[in-house]
Amino acid sequence: MTTLARYNEIVPPLNDPVLGCIPWAIEWMMRYKGTVSGSWEIPSNQLHNFQTTYNLHRQTNGTTRNTYANILAAIIANHPNVGLVRCTTYQSGQAVQKFQRIESLIGQGIPCITSIKLRAQRNAHIVPVVEIRQDDIDVIWNIPNSGIQDIQSISKTDLFRMHNAGHGTEFMYLP
């Protein structure tokens, strides 16, 4: 079992559960790194409007999609030092390799986010990965305004099936 230490200390609420999961998850990674290592990519006092500012779909009335690449480019335009955030893609059929890499990063205390699309969902949901066990992966599915993390366990079988079908092939991390 590999667990991201101190993940339960980071509780920014997900402000827009329909379209805002990518900026929320990136904010979560930044807050995690800043809290654990003291190294802030963006000063913590500048993160209060982060999700609103970088929810590009809402900001542009739907003309720009919220993707890892679009949001990261917008963040870097305002905060060039955020270029440390890495986005990695594993092709369909490489699910095992992807989750081995995520497990390795988490074991080093490096926060990771990934996209998850389960059968009942129309779109993928971007979530922080906080624990990997033999058969399951725990993610923070949501943090409501109460500040209580909604941790979901998802079977590796389901995640590998989803990945190998071409959904959720990317993940981001903040070394």
Image (cartoon, rainbow, N blue to C red):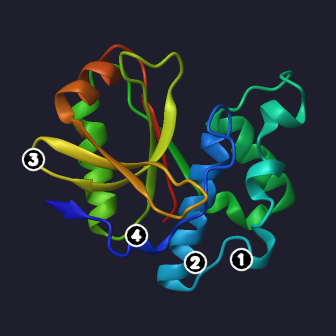
The answer to whether the residue labelled 4 contacts the one labelled 1, judged by CB atoms less than 8 Å apart, is no
The label nearer to you, 3 versus 4, is 4
> SS of the residue at dot 1?
helix
> SS of the residue at dot 3?
loop
Q: Which amino acid type is marked by label 3?
A: Gln
**For the N terminus, which image quadrant?**
bottom left
Q: Earlier in the sequence, mark 3 or mark 4?
A: 4
Q: Which amino acid type is marked by label 2?
A: Gly
> SS of the residue at dot 4?
helix
On the image, numbered disc 3 is attached to which residue? 134
Q: Earlier in the sequence, mark 2 or mark 3?
A: 2
Q: Earlier in the sequence, mark 4 or mark 1?
A: 4
Q: Residue at x 78, y 78 (%)?
A: 45
Between the residue at mark 1 and the residue at mark 3, the CA separation in whole angstroms equals 35 Å
> SS of the residue at dot 2?
helix
On the image, numbered disc 2 is attached to which residue? 34
On the image, numbered disc 1 is attached to which residue? 44
Q: Earlier in the sequence, mark 4 or mark 2?
A: 4
